[in-house]
Each structure stands twice: as structure tokens, then as C-alpha cells.
Image (spheres, rainbow, N blue to C red):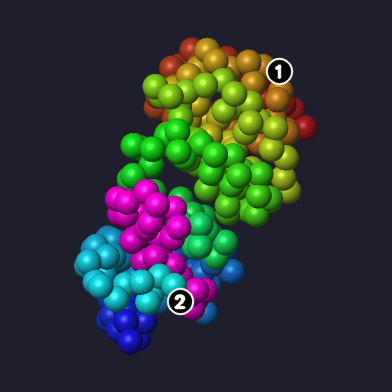
Amino acid sequence: MIKDEIRKRLFELQDIKFKEFSAGIIPEEGGGNDRMIGVRTPDLRKYAKELAKRKDIEDFLSDLPHDYFEEDQLHAFIISGMKDWDSLMEHLERFLPYVNNWATCDQMTPKAFSKHHKDLLPYINRWMASGEEFIVRFGIKQLMDHFLDDDFNIRYPKQVAKIRSDKYYINMMIAWYFATALSKQYDAIIPFIEQKKLDTWTHNKSIQKAIESYRITSEQKEYLRTLKIKK
């Protein structure tokens, strides 16, 4: 079975020291010692490209949930390389409910999205409204990755600013979104910070991440520092 073959290969690629490092930065439900094998990302990406060519890969992709973090990563990388829109979205919608950590969420970056912005927007709206921590995070990230340049519209940051959550990985993505948006659409985004459209933690984290960005000018950073909310 392809599942057994994949697992055997993953353990052959195992790096124990990397496992210990990764287990410390991936949430327990997503990684931890029980779900972590310890395979470096470049090796996983290379292996995913090999697997994507297999005729029996569907047997692996349909076998959900996976037992190991690295199997989730392989799944995400295989999806990311899919070119056919319908097949991509079918596999993505099936897999998203099982994504339970920031690494798999953030590293799943379907290349086909760049050619299907209009088709993508309804999915993003539904993902952001789902209430599920990593599905919401994934939706916000797609707005950040694909709709802050030529296809930017002010209604997108308005949508993100309305999201309220007690989930750390959602709020961190909102902060990442606004910090990136400040670097690309400063004049349109700065009013969200000036008018305190975000909750206090996310507001201050957005400013912190923007100040850390090399794409924000020194003058902009100085002004952003004055907008921090003192607790």
C-alpha cells in the first residue's frame, strides 16, 4: 500500500535533532513527539513532487486523517502543486478540516490560486466565516498572499478587521495581514490602525510586526510607534 510505503520512506528521512526542534514550535495537536517523525521541509517538498506523479496517490490523499505531521505536510505540498482548479479545490476542501497547525496551514500555497482570483474569493469568504482556527487562518492568508497588490480592494481589510476570536493563530494571522498590508497599501491601511479597528492585542502585534518589516520606512515606523495602545 502507498500509505505504508510513504511512512517507511519518511522514517528513512528522519532527523532526530530536527524532530526535537520541530516538536517545540508546532502545537501539540499538530506535532508534538507523538505525531512528529522529524523530516526536514526540503526533503518533504522533494518527496511530494515524486509522489504527485504516482497514479495511486489518490489512495494516500483520501486516507484522512493522517497519523503523522509529515504526512499532513506531504498532503499540503501535493495539493499546492495541483494545476487543475476543480481537482485542487476538491482535494483542498476535503483536507482543510484536518489541518491543525500553523506550519501545514501556512505552507500550503496552491500555485493555481494566482490564476483564479475571482474563483477564489467566494472560498476565502467562506473560510474566514467558518470559525475553525486554521481554516480561518488559511482564508486570511490567501487574502494576504493574493489580494494586496493589483487586486487589492478596501473591502478585504474591512472583512479581516471585523474578525474577533480568542484563537491565538487567528489573531496572529490578522496581525501578519495588517503588517503586510501596511507595507503594500500604507495609505489605505493606516486608518485601520489610527481608528483602532482591531482588538488591543492584535492592534499592537500588527504594529510590532510592521515595525520589524524592512518594507516600512523609518518615518512610518516612528509614526506607528505613537499608535500603540498602552495597556
**Residue 163 is at least partly visible in this image:** yes
Q: Residue at x 35, y 37 (%)?
A: 114
Residue 66 inside the magenta-drawn segment: yes
Q: Main secondary structure of the magenta part?
A: helix
Name the quadrant containing residue 90.
Answer: bottom left
N-term mark: 2 or 1: 2
Read off the magenta span: 63-91
Q: Residues within 10 Å of mark 2 (few under 14, many from 20)?
A: few
Q: Is residue 192 shown above or below 175?
A: above
Q: Amino acid at mark 1?
A: Gln
Tell me the tag on residue 119: none
Image quadrant occupied by the C terminus: top right
Q: Amino acid at mark 2?
A: Asp
**Residue 207 is at least partly visible in this image:** no
Q: Residue at x 58, y 54 (%)?
A: 134
Secondary-structure class at tag 2: loop
Residue 75 inside the magenta-drawn segment: yes
Q: Residues within 10 Å of mark 1 (few under 14, many from 20)?
A: few
Q: Residue at x 48, y 19 (%)?
A: 185
Secondary-structure class at tag 1: loop
- Residue 61 horizontal/vertical position (percent): 40, 70
Question: According to the image, label 1 marks what residue?
Answer: 195
Tell me the tag on residue 63: 2
Q: Residue at x 51, y 57 (%)?
A: 93
Between marks 2 and 1 in the image, the one whose residue lies nearer the viewer: 2
Check the image and name the residue furthest to the front: 86
Q: CA distance from mark 2 to mark 1?
A: 47 Å
Q: Is residue 110 left or right of residue 174?
A: left
User: In front: 154, or 20?
Assistant: 154
Q: Is residue 45 left or right of residue 108?
A: left
- Residue 173 horizontal/vertical position (percent): 56, 42
